[in-house]
Image: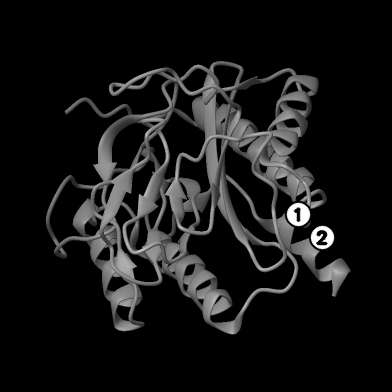
Amino acid sequence: MKIFLKTEEEIQLMREANQLVGLTLAELSKHIKPEISTLQLDKITEEFIRDHQAEPTFKNYPNPFGQPFPSSICTSVNECVVHGIPSAKQYLREGDIISIDCGVLLNGFNGDSAYTFCVGDVSHEIRRLLEVTEQSLYKAIQVAVAGHKVGDIGNTVQDYCESNGYGVVRELTGHGIGKAMHEDPPVPNYGKPGTGEILKNGMCIAIEPMITLGSRKIGLLPDKWGIITLDRKPAAHFEHTIVVRHGKSEILSSFEEIKHLQNEKI
């Protein structure tokens, strides 16, 4: 396993890339409403990223099972857990949820973050799924400090989400990140405390709980990208990129602007 510890100069570049991802997700939040297509959201994304002198990392990302990813974001609606391909035929409806995963390449370093948005009024049951998934992300970040191990992160997510009655997807993981979008180590959302790779100061990792309302069992869509729940119940996905530090790690990405815009709507 090859793990790249980042210098402070590299961490600053990672910070800038991840802040741009946060701004991109916030820009998308302005457009998430019934009757918009996921392809329209993708076009807004690509224009926004390129206007900020960055590249959408996901576009043409290779796939071991088939064609490269054709779009700038993953748009995963309702039972689609991750890797949904934007489509001109897929329109958002009142009561949907949509998980948007976004990556950018800026000045040689990657940013990566994801957020699950409500489309209009969403049931209390589904809102609760989103709340617990997001809370599990922050609980995991609290234990992702130098000296702990990758298993501590996964165990935290698993314990919290399963204790609330939800399923934890196991086949997909978080990951190291830097000059490449996916670096070592893998960061599962399940595991045993005190196991796995040791976390070191300067490691940059993406932590991304993928949590299901029903069974954790998943399947691959015919497009060889989209991952769905087999029971067709909704799933939530929240992701931050962090840098591991002693005592308390730093979140490089941000949901702050999304929350600010959501509060303005209330």
Q: Which mark is residue 197?
A: none
Nearer the observer: mark 1 or 2; the answer is 2
Q: Position of residue 175 (x, y in %)?
A: 34, 39
Left or right for 8, reference 192: right
Q: Is residue 91 shown above or below 112?
A: below
Q: Position of residue 3 (x, y in %)?
A: 26, 29
Whether residue 149 appears in this view of the structure is no
Distance in Å between CA atoms under marks 1 and 2? 6 Å
Which element type, helix, strand or loop, lies under badge 2? helix
Q: Is residue 216 shown above or below 213?
A: above
Q: Please give the name of the residue rendered at 30% of the width and 82% of the height, measured from the top-left corner.
A: 163
Question: 16 or 261, which lies in front?
Answer: 261
Q: Quadrant of the C terminus?
A: bottom right
- In the rendered image, which quarter is residue 63 located in? top left
Scheme of colours in the image:
one colour
Q: Please give the name of the residue rendered at 65% of the width and 74% of the height, measured from the top-left corner.
A: 122
Amino acid type at image mark 2: Leu
Mark 1, residues whose alpha carbon is within 10 Å: few (<14), some, or many (≥20)?
some
Mark 2, residues whose alpha carbon is within 10 Å: few (<14), some, or many (≥20)?
some
Amino acid type at image mark 1: Glu
Which element type, helix, strand or loop, lies under badge 1? helix
Q: Please give the name of the residue rendered at 54% of the width and 16% of the height, measured from the top-left corner.
A: 108
Mark 1–mark 2 CB contact (< 8 Å): yes
Q: Which residue has dot 1 on it?
A: 257
Question: 90 or 148, which lies in front?
Answer: 90
Q: Which residue has dot 2 on it?
A: 261
Q: Is residue 151 shown above or below 8?
A: below
Left or right for 44, reference 8: right
Q: Is residue 78 shown above or below 136?
A: above
Question: 222 or 131, which lies in front?
Answer: 222
